[in-house]
Image: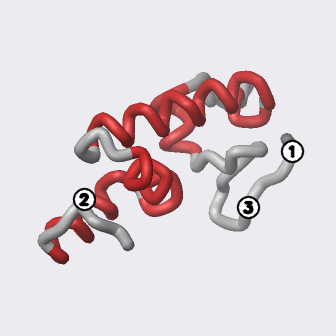
Amino acid sequence: PQAISKAGAAGIWQFMPRTGKSIMKVTDDIDERRSPMKSTVGAAKYLRMNARGLHNSWPLSVLAYNHGPGGVSRALKKRGTREIT
């Protein structure tokens, strides 16, 4: 839970500050990214949000966990497909 990357991702799910703030409480005093329970709920919410925004595709949602939903959307548009294989 105390892990922090060089890029600023924190906790077991390695949320970046901006992504974390969109799902859970991340302030100077409280950082729920470091809570195993709250960050796990946050990760599930984030995956669900990604899936809904990416054609209800769980594989694309998982890909977007690391690359961001915008990055995945741009890649799909560039390739002209929803397939990632």
Pick the residue in front: 47 or 12: 47
Residue under the point 18% across and 76% down: 79
Is 84 rendered above or below residue 47?
below
Q: Which residue is mark 2?
A: 73
Screen quadrant of the N terminus = top right
In the image, taking residue 25 as reference, residue 3 lies left or right, namely right
In the image, taking residue 83 as reference, residue 11 lies left or right, namely right
In the image, taking residue 19 as reference, residue 6 lies left or right, namely right
Q: Secondary structure at mark 3?
A: loop
Q: Amino acid at mark 2?
A: Ser
**Cβ atoms under marks 3 and 1 closer than 8 Å:** no
Screen quadrant of the C terminus = bottom left
Q: Secondary structure at mark 1?
A: loop
Q: Secondary structure at mark 2?
A: helix
Q: CA distance from mark 2 to mark 3?
A: 25 Å
Residue 19, horizontal then vertical, whole percent:
50, 42
Q: Which residue is mark 1?
A: 2
